[in-house]
Amino acid sequence: MTAATVSPNTQTGTARPWLTAAIVWALLLTVPFWLPMLGGYTALAARVLVFGLAAMSFNLLLGFTGVMSFGHAAYFGLGAYGAGLTLKYIAASTPLAILAGILLGGLAGTLFGLFIVRRRGVYFAMVTVAFGQIAFYVAYSWDSLTGGYDGLRGFSRAPLHLGPLTLDIVNNDKIFYYFLLAVFAIATGLQGLLLASPFGRTLLAIRENERRARFLGIPVERHIWMSFSISCCFTALAGALYALLNNFADPMGLHYSLSGEIVIMAVMGGMRAFWGPLAGAALFVILQDTISSMTVNWMSFVGLIFVLVVLFFPRGMLGIFQKGTGK
Amino acid sequence: MISSAHIAIRRRALLKSSLAITALAAPPIIAARGETPVRIGMVDPLTGILSALAASEVEGARYTVDLLNKRNGILGRPIELLVEDSANDVGTGVQKTRKLIERDKVDVVFGDVNSGIAYAMSQVTNELKVFQIVPGGHTDPITGTDCKWNVFRICNTTSMDAAAVTGNLVKRFGKKFFFVTPDYAYGHTLQDRFVKNLKALGGEFQAELLPINTSEYSATLIKAKAYKPDVLLNNMGGLAQINCMKQFIQFGMQKEMALGGALYELESIKSVPKDAQAGTWDMEWWWNQPNVPEVATFVGDFRKATGKTPSARHWFGYVAVQSVRLAAEKAKSLEGPKLALAMEDMDLPPDVALQPGRVYYRAGDHQLMSNIFVGDAHPPTGSPDDVFTVTSVVPGETAAGPVSETGCKMVHPA
């Protein structure tokens, strides 16, 4: 897996990234067999995959470009609406729905990116929040198309027809999980290739020292814009998969609170590690699912764990395995 | 002195400990018991603005589960109630419903107080063919245009609530209404029905649609003041309704217009200042019914067990669990399709109905036909819970109209 070549610590020359990738894939491939024995369920694993992909996509921007967005839920939600609206109004085709989701979220991100690419720091973050809230209120107010606050209902993912073979992703949750895993593998594979390419290296250079990158003649704004657009496309893909998972899309999928959760997942897992956001998403989703069944104050526990991770493991859960003192 | 190597080791140890704690925090493996329990999953907004109403529904269901477990359970099996918080968020409600069905393998699902969530849940339970009762989500399509073979509802539809009280409000206060309405499924259908009834009586109105969790109403109340309505209909729910009431009083508007609307529940009336304990409203069940002896027994037992006076929400939870028992006994099964058929046109016995007249689940739309208690809210007289006086009882069927008007076309699985 390309992840081995994209870890920021590849310069250490150890086999650890390959080992991490092997463990991650072994776990993901066998989830439907061991998770129920631990009291979990397949839909929970599917949720981890979806939010893991969203957090990893967001991390292309934060972890590997050094730019903070607080509005990534907008592209996640647009991806979900793109998929849902396609299934409801255009055609009962799962691939078409995914494509529409990516296009809607990705194009919105690409266009919006043009306007904000010159902003930095807190200004960049604030403008991304503002755009996210615009998207939220459009979905909330456009009741006739989006279903308003109640969300978009009345659509369902369709079976996949691969020549003579039909995959029943509608009624069989395990087949649907492996379908999600296949899409996840393609997306993370592309992300890995991207980060290992000269373009990815350039992003790392911008993250490490933007001024020096500029002096070297690198068109910094263009690279940040491209990174933002690519990140939005992958986040929209995650949103489209979320709509397929729930057969449902709602405005809270565009809300800034979800943007905050995506940031928490990436930071908790380790934003300098390729698989870190996936680990963060797994921890967040499992904690939410488990603790919220025990107490209505579950957010306090998630918040406490987040604070502890930030205090004691500033590079996140997977960051602890990395060598060096990178801040 | 502690070296950096020591710190690194300790950090690793801390990481390992954290992972171990996380593993322990994973959902526990539920041990097999002597008798497989009947599992009921309940999704309700235990956090958020509807939490007080949700807590009462859950408490009513828990009370009934304890009561039945002391007797013979359901079909001789103990009952286990699994409660999940939807956090008043549709996406979370859908996720929790899937969790209850796929992980916990519940036989029946209850929920949600939030109409939008209840509506979305019905799509999931229908897809997974699990029997669902909606104890307290009012929006019409659940038992109307989008009715489903596996979904039954206990609380009234918004059409029923609006039909029961509109004439009363017009007769007593006038034909000029100002609506403060939550901008989601419940609010939309409720306001539509009020407007339809009001227009039929020659009335006029202005309305303001607000987010479900609105806490600040000054701009809306200024608009209402300028419109000079005869009645302000506060259609908000839970904490949002309470906040609106408090600000209504702070603005001194109670001297200029009457208050009224569909629901002003016991939990909410008790949470507002005395001046806001006013207006003409519907109660979907009321604890003080001197002419129905079963009610006094139920209220006494409930108070003994919980220390509280039961509200309509408690009754919803009570009826939901009792309905599963009655339908399972009739069907001799807990399979969804058999439960659904058994529940159709099923009468509730007096000790479950707890009100006068016939109370039953209408086969055509799966809506419970129960009475609507129209009356006036007022500051406590006697006991702290004596905050509402019933002036008329409207039979459910009168308020609901015929099935053909609901738009429901019930289709059972082959």
Image (cartoon, coloured by chain):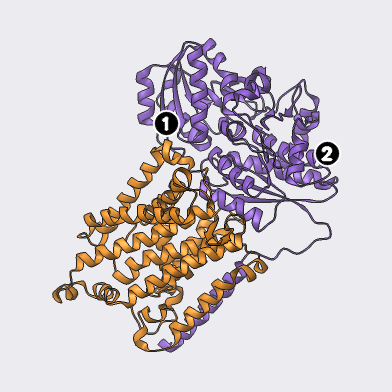
Residue B25 picture location, percent across and down: 60, 67
Name the mark on residue B271.
none
Q: As drawn, is A313 to the left or to the right of B49? A: left
Q: Position of residue A127 (x, y in %)?
A: 27, 53
Q: Residue at the spot x=33%, y=79% of the render?
A: A326
Left or right for B210, reference B275: left
Q: Amino acid at mark 1?
A: Leu
Q: Amino acid at mark 2?
A: Lys
- Name the residue located 51 percent from the left edge and 37 percent from the top edge: B239
Whole-percent x and y of residue B177? 45, 18
Location of the N terminus of chain B (image quadrant)? bottom left
User: Where does the C terminus of chain B fall, quadrant-wise?
Assistant: top right
The answer to whether residue A91 is above or below residue B297 is below
Quarter where residue A196 is shown: bottom left
**Local crowd size for mark 2, using a 10 Å CA cut-off: few (<14), some (14–19), many (≥20):** some
Q: Point out the tag, 2 or 1, that comes first from the N-terminus.
A: 1
Q: Looking at this view, name the residue that lies furthest to the front.
A: A164
- Residue at horizontal 54%, vertical 74%? B18
Disc ID at residue B209:
1
Of labels 2 and 1, the one closer to you: 2
**Helix, strand or loop for disc 1:** strand
* Residue A321 placement (x, y as % from top left): 44, 81
The residue wearing badge 2 is B330
Q: Which chain is purple?
A: B
Q: Residue at x 67, y 31 (%)?
A: B367
Q: Which chain is orange?
A: A
Q: Is A56 rendered above or below residue A146?
A: below
Q: Is residue B31 left or right of residue A313?
A: right
Q: Residues within 10 Å of mark 1 (few under 14, many from 20)?
A: some
Subunit that carries the residue with mark 2 = B
